[in-house]
């Protein structure tokens, strides 16, 4: 039997986690809407799907944001690398669909 006060606290924490998860999903969806527009522009202009300089900048920026937020920067980098790989995959698919098909991809 769980103490009622503990159950109430646990429920509150879990509700906060559920709300944050929902916000994360919506933020990721918005991010991918933006990166889709970038992918279309890159494909239309025959630019490569990957931009290693931009990726390096973003990783460094996110690591600093993580440190400032007291979040493990290694975790933040792993998370961003996962997103970057997915964005590049989307950009490659967009380029293939448009006919750009530029194979110069660096993950």
Image (spheres, grey):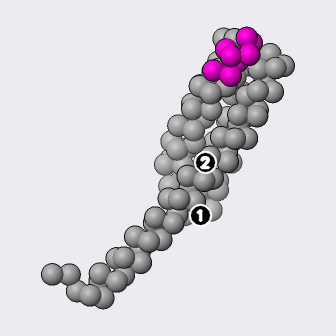
- 23 on left or right of 33: left
Res. 106 image quadrant: top right
Rendered residue at 76%/27% (across/down): 40
Rendered residue at 67%/34% (across/down): 55
With respect to residue 65, does 45 lie above or below?
above
Segment colored magenta: 93-100
The residue under label 1 is: 69
Front-most of residues 79 and 23: 23
Magenta stretch: helix, strand or loop mostly:
helix
With respect to residue 49, does 96 lie above or below?
above
Front-most of residues 101 and 76: 101
With respect to residue 13, does 56 lie above or below?
above
Rendered residue at 65%/40% (across/down): 32
Distance from Cα at disc 2 to Cα at disc 1: 19 Å
Q: Residues within 10 Å of mark 2 (few under 14, many from 20)?
A: few
Front-most of residues 21 and 103: 21
CB within 8 Å, label 2 to label 1: no
Q: Position of residue 62 (x, y in %)?
A: 64, 49
Rendered residue at 81%/27% (across/down): 41
Earlier sequence position, callout 2 versus callout 1:
2
User: Can you say which quadrant of the picture contains the C terminus?
Assistant: top right
The residue under label 2 is: 28
- 73 on left or right of 5: right
């Amino acid at each position: 039997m769980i103490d009622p006060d503990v159950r109430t606290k646990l429920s509150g924490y879990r509700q906060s986690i559920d709300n944050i998860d929902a916000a994360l999903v919506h933020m990721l969806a918005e991010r991918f809407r933006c990166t889709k527009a970038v992918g279309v522009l890159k494909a239309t202009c025959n630019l490569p799907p990957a931009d290693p300089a931009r990726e390096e900048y973003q990783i460094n920026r996110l690591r600093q944001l993580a440190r400032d937020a007291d979040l493990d920067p290694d975790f933040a980098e792993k998370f961003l690398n996962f997103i970057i790989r997915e964005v590049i995959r989307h950009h490659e698919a967009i380029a293939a669909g448009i006919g750009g098909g530029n194979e110069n991809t660096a993950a």
